Image: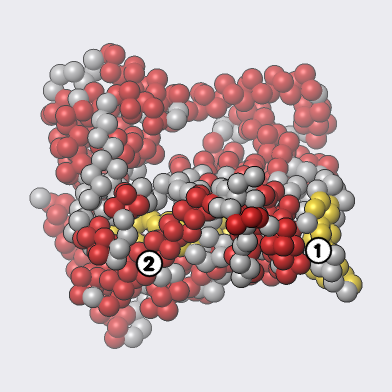
Amino acid sequence: MAGLISQQTIESVQNISDIVAVVGEYTKLERRSGNDWWGCCPFHNEKTASFHVDGDKKFYYCFGCHAGGDIIKFIMEMEKVSYIDAVRSLAKRAGIEIVYADGQLPEHSHNDDLRDSYIDLYERTATLFHYLLTQTDGGKPALAYITGRGLTIDTINKFKLGYAPSNRRWLKIFLLKKNFSEDFLNSSGLFSKKYPDISFFSNRLMFPIFNRRGQCVALGGRILNGEGPKYLNSGDLVQYKKGETLYAFNFAKNAIREEKKVIFCEGYMDCIAYHQCGITYAVAPLGTALTEDQLKIVHGFADTVLLSFDSDGAGQNATLRAITMCRKQGFTVKIIRLTGGKDPAEIMVNFGAETLTNEVNSAILDSDFLLSKLGQDYAVDTPEGKTKASLAFFTYVDSLQSDIQRESCLEQLCQAFNLKPEAVKRDFDNRDQARERLKIRQQTSTDKQNADIKLNAELRAVLAVIADLDQYKVMRAELTVDDFEDPVAKKLFIILEDCFREQSVSVSSILTHCGNEEIERMITRVISSGEFSKNSGRIIQDSIQFIKRNTLERKRDQLMNRIRLFNPVTPSDQQQLKELLAEKANLNSRLKQ
């Protein structure tokens, strides 16, 4: 059989590999006696450790789900790879040379070699971008920006932040001179598919994305100025799956293991701010909603999840989804409410690490968060509002793993909305009514979505552009995604930009990107009605001016709030206050124009 790994190599892998160290990367293990180790099973959800690793006999077994085998089987199951790929991975880790039976060429080696080659490319590229940020004149504006956001040089070096130059042809020329082949570079994800000489990242602050071993496997970039989406991220690659990777997990895993808790936050800067403030158990999903695969990464290490997402509509929806997902996997869940600023980085800069630490320590249980939110979302002073709020809360209660937790949360519900326990329990326990609740809940969700989508100025502007797509170039020249407050308008603007960059600006492409039936119906309804068929250009220009003015007013209000909270003590503080007041005067002047 071609490419059969020799038995001698397999035995070396089995004998030399440290199964305790390997398994310990996926779940926290504790020694009970000798070389016997126990922990929570990484293959299923459990609170009590039933997963046994025998370091001497080099096998594992779970008394809960009955998973078991040797170290090769463990890697096959955890990484979802073939037997040969598991052996190759373990051999490389242990420094064992692979010998193939009868001197034959290795089967399945191409993907493994390609994975290693791409990791090498991304490691080199990240190092290059880091050098350009920290050691060259071209990187000074980006370095000034990031240090202005409060990051120290030590933090910049730790996370290997970098700068992608504005010359979009430079990187390809540079890498070709380093003897990388053109075909290899074209398929690497670093360059445009349509224009392969053009770099995917340009004039951006770069964030290397590391795997659990600390190897750079992908990149994210924040725009510094000019056109384009605020963040660009590598797509899925042979060495990288964004839904199965957590940003900064390589830095956070030891702290997560020791603290038995993890913070999931919004993005790169939030995560880095937590780490710089000494809160080193923070990680972030990578441009996607939190996934079950990402939860599995931390499941063996943490008991408690703290959610630190934005307070806008999208962030709140992400929090709600994450609560249910985490509870179903057996985690205790708390919510971090940032009262001192809009995000961790702002709190770090304005108030320091102690304030951010206090915000984390003041996190509230998810049940308290949900009851507070439901009290705001529904008219709980009316019987109908109480019913809808209760039905929504029952969904959360259903996700809890413990009967005691369920009973306690139902008691909380009664106290929060002044309900009789007997009525709540009857309603919750009755399965026929539960099915009816589901129908009502689905209808309530649809009604709420319909109510949320209001044709304000922002949404009218974006819909007018969709009705007349030639106008998008006008809009993107005047506005960025940060100018939008309305979550639906912001989502559609991002979709338009994605379609524009993919050279596929059409209504069908926009609808494909939506992922929300109600928004799709709204778009098709508005276009079909012909509401924007006349004077679309005038509507768009008027809306753009309105949005720009709103943005300036929002910035001024945030600045005034910052000035009110500012307490200048040192000469440096006085200078900073002077700069803030000058910025406020500039905004006022622009608003008068």
Type of colouring: secondary structure
**What is the C-alpha distance between the residues marked 2 and 1?**
36 Å
Task: Measuring from the top left, give residue 425's x and y in whole percent.
Answer: 81, 31
Visible residue check, residue 384: no
Helix, strand or loop status at disc 2: helix
| 10 Å crowding of disc 1: few (<14), some (14-19), many (20+) | some
Q: Which residue occupies the foreground of this view, 529 or 22?
A: 22
Q: Which residue occupies the foreground of this view, 119 or 50?
A: 119
Q: Which residue is mark 1?
A: 58
Q: Is there CB contact under 8 Å for labels 2 and 1?
A: no
Task: Measuring from the top left, give residue 534's x and y in whole percent.
Answer: 15, 19
Above or below, 449 against 53 in this view is above
- Looking at this view, name the residue that lies furthest to the bottom: 571
Task: Measuring from the top left, give residue 306's x and y in whole percent.
Answer: 61, 57
Count of numbered marks: 2
Visible residue check, residue 272: yes
Q: Which residue occupies the foreground of this view, 307 or 593?
A: 307
Residue drawn where x is 67% and y is 30% of the image: 391
